[in-house]
Image (cartoon, helix red, strand yellow):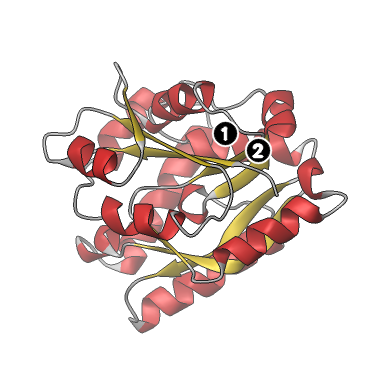
Amino acid sequence: MAGLSVVVPALNEARHLPSLLADLQRWPDALQIVVVDGGSTDKTIQVAHQGGARVLQSPVQGRGQQLQLGLQCSQHAWLLILHADSRLSQNWVDHVQRVHTMAHGRQQAWAFDFRVDERRPMLRLLEWCVGLRSRWGQMPYGDQGLLIHRSLYDRVGGYRSLALMEDLDLIQRLRQISRIGALGCALTTSSRRWSRRSVLNQAWKNAQLRRRWRNGVNAEQLIQTYRR
């Protein structure tokens, strides 16, 4: 059985992080958890230590930079990238181990099915749309996690130092050399971003950010819109 390095970028995630760290402890073999903090003002760092993670403090705030730092310090051949407000399914270990034993497992990247921790009808519709985009469009985003072998990660060039769109940037490059497979189990994300505005408004905002990114607007400019 292979070891697993899990990298989690975090910023003020003391509320959500303990649940994810507990989920990860179900991994039965060698496990390394690296939480890369982007300047939290809550108890994120303390919580991460208590949950068995190695904590790194990024000199720059932004998921791209944080992921770069965390992955540089990772030890195992298999890498799992997760957002701090995620919850893993009870059977996630079985699905990841299945990929490890596949002949072609390390030749492509893998993502979880998208779920939200609230049962509003519009969020169910969002889950369905994301499923189509991921499975048929080969475009999973960061809130679906990413399981990737180090050889493929290095081959594609890894994450770039981006304040935003680091997931889209990596997936676009991965699609040129590999497929992105479905792990076949859910990763549940917090509904908090859809609590501040309607599902349609948030989806529209996200789509506009991606459109501007594809049109050449840099991530530093986009982050100002993202945080509004």
| Residue at image coords 49%, 69% | 89
Q: Quadrant of residue 221?
A: top left
Q: Position of residue 161 (x, y in %)?
A: 46, 20
Q: Quadrant of residue 164?
A: top left
Residue linked to disc 1: 169
Image position of 101 with respect to 136: above or below: above
Please name whichever residue, 184 or 167, is drawn nearer the observer in this view of the structure. Answer: 184
Q: Which residue is mark 2?
A: 172
Taking 150 as reference, is 16 left or right?
A: left
- How crowded pointer 2 is (Cα within 10 Å; few <14, some 14-19, many 20+) is rated as few
Q: Quadrant of the C terminus?
A: top left
Instruction: Where is residue 118? Give x, y as percent.
Output: 32, 76
Q: Amino acid at mark 1?
A: Asp
What separation in Å lies between label 1 and label 2 (alpha carbons)? Answer: 5 Å
- Residue 172 or residue 108, whichever sits in front: 108
Residue 190 quadrant: bottom left
Q: In this orientation, which residue lies closer to the viewer: 142 or 185?
A: 185
Question: Taking 8 as reference, is 190 above or below it?
Answer: below
Which element carries disc 2, helix, strand or loop?
A: helix
Q: Could you tell me residue 215's position as x and y percent?
A: 53, 32
- Front residue of 210 and 182: 182
Q: Which percent across, then down, holds residue 75?
A: 57, 28
Secondary element under disc 1, as helix, strand or loop, is: helix
Q: Are marks 1 and 2 in contact (CB under 8 Å)?
A: yes
Rendered position, 203 above or below 83: below
